[in-house]
Image (cartoon, rainbow, N blue to C red):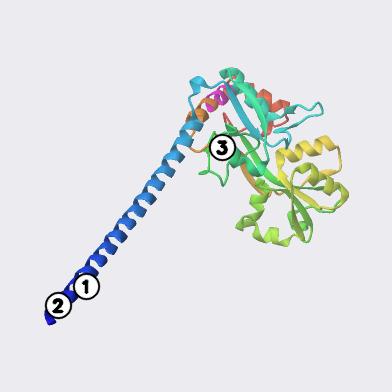
Amino acid sequence: MKKIIALLCAATLVSVTLIGCGSKEAESTATATTEEAVTEETTTEAATTEATATEAAGTLADKTTFTVGFDANFPPYGYMDEDGEYVGFDLDLAQEVCDRIGWELVKQPIDWDSKDMELSSGSIDCIWNGFTYNGREDEYTWSDPYIDNSQVFVVAEDSGIASIADLSGKIVDVQADSAALTALEDEENADLAGSFGELIQVPEYNTAFMNLEAGAADAVAMDIGVANYQIASRGEGYVILDEPLTTEVYAIGFLLGNEELRDAVQEQLNAMAEDGTFAKIAEKWDLTDCIKIGK
C-alpha cells in the first residue's frame, strides 16, 4: 500500500514538473515572439519612413511638374487677384524656375495649418510662400534664404499708438500659425504678449485689417512685406511702428531629406540672381530692399 502511495506521489510530482516546464517554455516562446514582432514593426516603420522620403525625392529625370504649396491669402507672395488668377512674388519666382528647367508649374493653394501634412503626403513638392526659416531649421530641407523679412506691428494712423510700449492693454490680431504668432509665443517676448489686452488669432490678414478698420483690433502683428502691400493697396490710414517685433528670413521648405529637388531649384535661383532676373521680379513686387540671395 505504501509503495502504491509512493508511486502515485512520484507520478504527481513528475506531472507538475512537466506542466511547470511547459508553462515556462510557452511563456518564453510568447515573449520571444512579442519581442520579434516589436523589432519587426520598428524595422518596418523605419523602412517605410525611408521609402517615403526616397519616393518624395523621386528622380528628377522623370519629373515633369513642380507643385508649389502656398497660402492664397498672403500677398504679395501668393494670392488670388481680381481676375481669379493666383499671382505673387514667390509664384513668379517658381514660374521662372520651372521655365528654365522645363517643368509645368502647379500652383496649389493650401490650408496653412495643414502644410506639413500636404508636404509629407506628397501632395506638394515644397512650401514656397513667405515661409520663415528661423526656428524651423531642422524640420525641412531648405533652400538658401532669399528674402530678408521682419515682423512688425501695423496700427491706424490716428490711433495714438507710437511705439510697442503703447500696445499695453490693446487688442492685437495675428494670423494663425504665422511667424508673428511664433515670435509672440517665444519666451523672449512673453512680457510684451502678456501686456496686451488680448491676442486674437485670425485665419488671414484681410480679416485682421477689417478688424483694424472697424476698431475691433488696435494693431496687427505681421510680416513687413505683407504689411507694406496691405497699406499700399488700402491707401492712407495705416502706419508701421518703427520698432520691429523680430527679424527673420524666408526660404523654400522641401521634405526633409529631399536634397536632390532642393539643389535643382537652388541652382536656378542662383542663376536668376546672377543674371538679374531675380532682382527684376523683386522690383515688380516692390521687394527690392528685401533681397538676400546673391548678396
Q: Position of 35 compared to 108: left or right? A: left
- Label 2, secondary structure: give it: helix
* Residue that numbered label 2 is attached to: 4
Kindly identify the amino acid type of the residue bearing the numbered disc 2: Ile
Q: Nearer the viewer, mark 1 or mark 2?
A: 2
For label 3, count other residues whose C-alpha is less than 10 Å away and answer few (under 14), some (14-19) or many (20+).
Answer: few
Residue 253 versus residue 162 in the image, above or below? above
* Residue that numbered label 3 is attached to: 121
Kindly identify the amino acid type of the residue bearing the numbered disc 1: Thr
**Sequence-wise first label, 1 or 2:** 2
Q: CA distance from mark 3 to mark 2?
A: 75 Å
Image coordinates for residue 277, horizontal then vertical, percent:
63, 21
Image coordinates for residue 292, horizontal then vertical, percent:
60, 33
**Residue 257 inside the magenta-drawn segment:** no
Quarter of the image where the N terminus is located: bottom left
Residue 3 versus residue 160 in the image, above or below? below
Q: Looking at the image, which is closer to me, 45 or 226? A: 45
Q: CA distance from mark 1 to mark 2?
A: 12 Å
Kindly identify the amino acid type of the residue bearing the numbered disc 3: Ser
Q: Looking at the image, which is closer to me, 33 or 151? A: 33
Residue 108 versus residue 138 in the image, above or below? above
Q: Residue at x 76, y 26 (%)?
A: 85
Main secondary-structure element of the magenta-colored stretch: helix
Image coordinates for residue 8, horizontal then vertical, percent:
18, 75
Q: Nearer the viewer, mark 3 or mark 2?
A: 2
Q: CA distance from mark 1 to mark 3?
A: 63 Å
Say if mark 3 contacts mark 2, CB within 8 Å. Answer: no
Q: Residue at x 67, y 23 (%)?
A: 280
* Residue that numbered label 1 is attached to: 12
Image quadrant assignment for residue 50: top left
For label 1, count other residues whose C-alpha is less than 10 Å away and answer few (under 14), some (14-19) or many (20+).
Answer: few
Q: Which residues are magenta?
A: 266-272
